[in-house]
Image: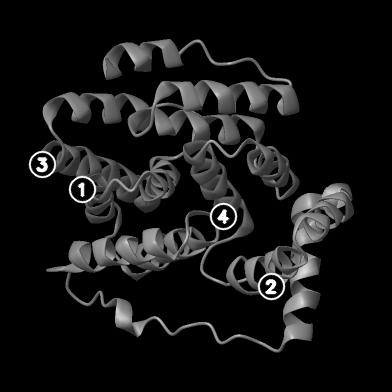
Amino acid sequence: MERWLFYLRKMSFISDRLKELFPSEHYRLLQRILSRKGLSKNIRLLCSLAYLQAEGDWTNLRRVLDLYIENEGDLIRAYEVLLQGYLFCGYPRAIESFFCVNEALDGKKNLDISKIKPGILADSDSLLKRGETLSRIVHKDKYDKIKRKIDELCPDLGYLMIAEGYGHILYREGLNSRLRELAIVATLTSLDAGRQLNSHIRGARNVGCGDLEICEAIVTGMAWIEPGKIEKSLKLWSSIAGGERPNSIDNIIFWRV
C-alpha cells in the first residue's frame, strides 16, 4: 500500500512539474505520451534524455533532467544514460549534456555530481574479456558476425567497440542492461542509424526487454524528434518483432501538429 501511494505521489509530482517546465502545447503532448501503457513514466523520461542528447536539444534536456532527478538513484541513472551516449553521439554532445546535468542540480539539496567516482580503466586484456562476455549476452549468435564486420571496416573501431564500449562503459554498474538497451534504441532512432538500431533492437530483446517496451521506447521520441524517424524505426522494429505499428501514434501526431 505504501509503495502504491508513493507511486501516485510521484506521478502527481511529475504532472505538476510538467506544467511548470513546458509550454502548454508541449505539456499536453507529453502528458499523452507519458500516460501511454507499455512503459513506465520513469523509463520514458530516461529514454527522453537519450533522445534530447542525440538531438542536441539542451533546453528540453535541462527541463527533463530537472523533472526526472529527485534523488541520488535518479542522478546515477541519468548520469549513466548520458555517459553511454558519448559512444554514439561523441564527446561534444556528452560534455554539453553534463553542463545540463549540473544546471539541473542547482538548488537540489544533497545532490552533487562530484560525488560520483569515475570508473577506472582496467588493463586491455580484462576490458576485452568482459567486453566480449557482455557483447555476447547482448548480441548472442550475431556477435561473431558483428565483430567480424566491424574489424573488416576498421580494426581500431572493432577493438574500441569491445574494450571501451562493452568492456568499460556499458559494463558499468548504475544502470541495468535492459535500461541501457532501451536508451540506446532511443539514441539510435534519433540518429537515424539503421544498422546499429537493427542490432540494438535485437539486443534489447536478448537482455529481456519486451517487444511492447521497445516499441514504446521508440514512440516516446514523438515528443522530441521528427515523426519520420519514428516511422522508420517502428518499421524496423516490426520487421524484427513481428508486431504492427501502433495506430495510437496517429493521435500523438495530431497533438504534436
| SS at badge 1 | helix
Q: Which residue matches tag 3?
A: 20
Count of residue discs: 4
What distance separates the C-alpha of mark 2 from that of mark 4?
A: 14 Å
Kind of residue at disc 2:
Gly
Residue furthest to the front in view is: 153
N-terminal label among 2 and 1: 1
Residue contact between numbered discs 1 and 4, judged by CB atoms under 8 Å:
no
The part of the image, by quadrant, that contains residue 254 is: top left
Asked whether the beta carbons under mark 2 and mark 4 sit within 8 Å of each other, the answer is no
Whether residue 39 is visible, yes or no, is no
Marks 1/4: CA–CA distance:
23 Å
Q: Which residue is mark 2?
A: 167
Q: Label 1: how many residues lie within 10 Å, few (<14), some (14-19) or many (20+)?
A: few
In the rendered structure, find residue 59 and report the number of the disc placed on it.
1
Query: Residue 211: x and y, percent?
Result: 65, 32
Compared to 212, does 47 lie above or below? below
The span from disc 3 to disc 4 (Cα, nearest Å) is 29 Å
Q: Earlier in the sequence, mark 1 or mark 4?
A: 1
Point out residue 249 in the picture as x, y percentages from the top left corner. Answer: 44, 16
Mark 3 belongs to which amino acid? Glu
Q: Mark 4 is on which residue type?
A: Arg
